Image (tube, rainbow, N blue to C red):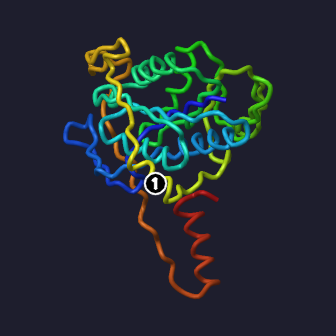
């Protein structure tokens, strides 16, 4: 059972982010982590390998720093990793990301492709579906349970207010949702192995692509501007005894906020 896991390095959830003066770019503190949902995908790949045998290979598209995300994958237990190294494509739209990833996948022999349901930076959740489309493979999203047997998979997806169970023939693409598993913490032996391993790097030109494909003017989507989230109103503390404070809170909800 050969499993490929698509991994993305994203800004650390605690990194400071501000809108650039142009309004079309973000200034992000240089703190990075593996995309949360990709960790679920990687953990599931490792569990499938433990049960059925085979190999797990992590693949990422990004700049030189993205090698750190792949080292985390190796530390967790992935057998191999490869980086498509290109800053322009990494900063491009979902279409070019999916195109580059699919070109690498076409060179691989695999049964399953696993990745997170979405990246927590752009939050678009579009790349896995497009990868599946480029490869002509079935895709099942937001998976919270996955059973593999006899060349097929039964996946349970979490939908809004319901669950869906889908059976597909392999190979297929699956996106992991929170609840699928609990990602393991890398052992020190895994971390040491990851620090020493040589991870191959591929240029987009090796995939039959050109850098100008990822230029902003050739993008399928364009950023008009970023807007900061609305500020929350200040918290109002109501003084006094509990009964009096509760009565005042009700009065405010009825007479001022008009929500009751």
Residue placed under numbered mark 1 in the picture? 191
Residue 190 percent location from the top left of the image: 50, 53
Residue 139 percent location from the top left of the image: 64, 23
Identify the residue shown where x is 37% and y is 39%.
Answer: 198
Camera-nearest residue between 225 and 11: 11
Q: Quadrant of residue 110?
A: top right
Label 1 sits on a secondary structure element that is helix
Identify the residue shown where x is 29% and y is 14%.
Answer: 210
Q: Is residue 258 above or below residue 134?
A: below
Q: Is residue 1 above or below residue 236?
A: above
Quarter of the N terminus within the rendering: top right
Identify the residue shown where x is 62% and y is 29%.
Answer: 2
Quarter of the C terminus within the rendering: bottom right
Residue 112 relative to residue 65: left or right: right
Q: For the view shown, which residue lies furthest in the bottom direction?
A: 241
Residue 89 relative to residue 236: left or right: left
Camera-nearest residue between 20 and 78: 78
């Amino acid at each position: 059972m050969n499993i490929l896991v698509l991994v993305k390095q994203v800004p650390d959830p605690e990194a400071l982010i501000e809108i650039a003066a142009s309004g079309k770019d973000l200034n992000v503190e240089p703190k990075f982590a593996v995309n949360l949902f990709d960790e679920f995908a990687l953990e599931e790949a490792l569990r499938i390998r433990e049960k059925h045998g085979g190999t797990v290979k992590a693949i990422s598209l990004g700049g030189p720093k993205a090698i750190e995300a792949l080292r985390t994958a190796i530390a967790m237990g992935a057998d191999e990793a490869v980086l498509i190294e290109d800053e322009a494509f990494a900063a491009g739209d979902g279409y070019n990301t999916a195109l580059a990833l699919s070109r690498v996948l076409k060179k691989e022999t695999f049964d399953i492709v696993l990745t997170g349901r979405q990246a927590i930076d752009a939050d678009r959740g579009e790349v896995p579906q497009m990868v599946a489309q480029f490869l002509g493979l079935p895709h099942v999203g937001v998976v919270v349970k996955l059973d593999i047997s006899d060349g097929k998979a039964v996946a349970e997806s979490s939908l809004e207010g319901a669950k869906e169970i889908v059976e597909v023939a392999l190979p297929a693409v699956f996106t992991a949702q929170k609840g699928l598993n609990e990602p393991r913490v890398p052992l020190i032996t895994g971390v040491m192995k990851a620090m020493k391993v040589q991870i191959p790097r591929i240029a987009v030109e090796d995939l039959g692509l050109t850098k100008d494909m990822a230029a902003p003017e050739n993008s399928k989507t364009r950023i008009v501007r970023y807007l900061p989230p609305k500020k929350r109103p200040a918290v109002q503390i109501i003084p006094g005894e509990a009964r009096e404070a509760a009565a005042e809170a009700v009065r405010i909800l009825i007479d001022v906020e008009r929500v009751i």
